[in-house]
Amino acid sequence: MKIKISDPIGKVPEKLLNWYDKHGRTLPWRLKDGSRPDPYKVWLSEIMLQQTQVVTATPYFEKFLTLWPCVTKLAEADLDDIFVEWAGLGYYARARNLHKCAKIIATSLDGVFPDNELELVKLPGIGAYTAAAIVAIAFDFKATPMDGNFDRVMARLHAIETPLPTAKPVLKELATKITPDLRPGDYVQAVMDLGATICTPRNPQCISCPVNACCLSLKKGQTTIIPKKKAKQRKPVRYGMAFLCINDKKEVLLRRRPNSGLFSGMMEIPGTPWTDCLPDSLQIEASKPTIATWSDIQGTVFHFFTHFKLEIKVVRADIKKSIKSNGLSWHPLESIDKAGLPSLMLKIIKHGLQ
């Protein structure tokens, strides 16, 4: 599809930038005075915003900046401290990669972020989208960060009926063609804001859209069915058992997970492996962290990951003295929220204390 500046869609950049100047969101990592934001802040915000809404990520972003105001300070931080402050954001591999990336930038790149996508994607935790977002927003270079908002806006503008994700290459090509040479960073943020506030997945506010005169989907009456998506497959279910052990000092027994896989390197409530069937008696006995009288806790803890659903049964033991073993440690229950535990583990503790 060849797009000319005289075409209605060719007018989208100017219209969007005018709208953005008046109605763009005020965000703590964003500058709207014509100057470029700190690449550290852009990178930090983009990592936090992966699979996370702005309203959720914003207080975490502000706390991180208070504790670690630059990439060098973040690189010097202890990973466990980062996990503590990250707790609740989920997708904890992001926190581990955040620390790895900060160390590389601080030590190997003299604290300077690369200004091109090819170098950025070599860094831990930075994929094609994040690299493009940093290049555009922080350095004001032409780039096309294709997230859900970009996909939706472009699909509706061009009335692309091919379902996602099959349509992604076409949508990126179309988006790249109309990205302006002037203010590409602001344009990228304008598209993101449009998708987040007006061109929303459900009930788009087309009457308020600054580019409604350019939208082919609106002309065809298809804004509620575009973008089309392939039917989601049902998530598989995995099962496990967690062993909540509490001593007479009101401390809870924790262990550190392996340095690979989900929650890598983080502390957890000991438990069985997560498998596609209920754990058998041999697995349960082999997974118990200590010899004790274990009591079943009624109910089940449910947790949803990107690719599967987890169902955890909880058993609890109250013991009079602390056991000592490699890989196990005790943490006071009253400050368990400071232990840097994944939200799943906090769910297990809460369930076991009922």
Image (cartoon, rainbow, N blue to C red):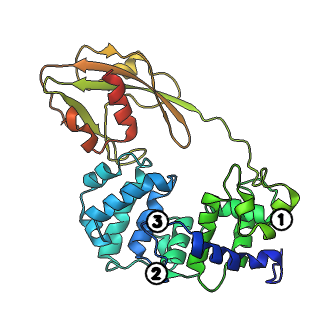
Q: Could you classify mark 2 by the number of other residues whose Cα lies within 10 Å: few (under 14), some (14-19), or many (20 or more)?
A: some
Badge 2 amino acid: Arg
Q: Earlier in the sequence, mark 3 or mark 2?
A: 3
* Left or right: 168, with 304 as reference point: right
**Disc 3 and disc 2: Cα gap in Å?**
14 Å
6 lies left or right of 208: right
- The residue carrying pointer 3 sits among few (fewer than 14), some (14 to 19) or many (20 or more) residues within 10 Å by Cα, namely few
The secondary element bearing badge 1 is classed as helix
Between 60 and 16, which is closer to the camera in this rendering? Answer: 16
- Mark 2–mark 1 Cα distance, whole angstroms, equals 33 Å
**Residue 216 appears left or right of 129:** right
What x and y, as percent, mark residue 70?
31, 71
Question: Residue under circle 2?
Answer: 36
> In the rendered image, which residue does mark 3 sit on?
27
Q: Position of residue 276 (x, y in %)?
A: 53, 28
Image quadrant where residue 257 sits: top left
Residue 146 in view, yes or no: no
Q: Quadrant of residue 254?
A: top left
Residue 216, disc: 1
Q: Residue at x 39, y 48 (%)?
A: 260
The residue that appears at 74% across and 56% down in the rendered structure is 166
- How far apart, in angstroms, are the residues tagged by discs 1 and 3? 31 Å
User: Which label's residue is closer to the chain start, 2 or 1?
Assistant: 2
- The residue nearer to you, when weighing 30 against 71, is 30
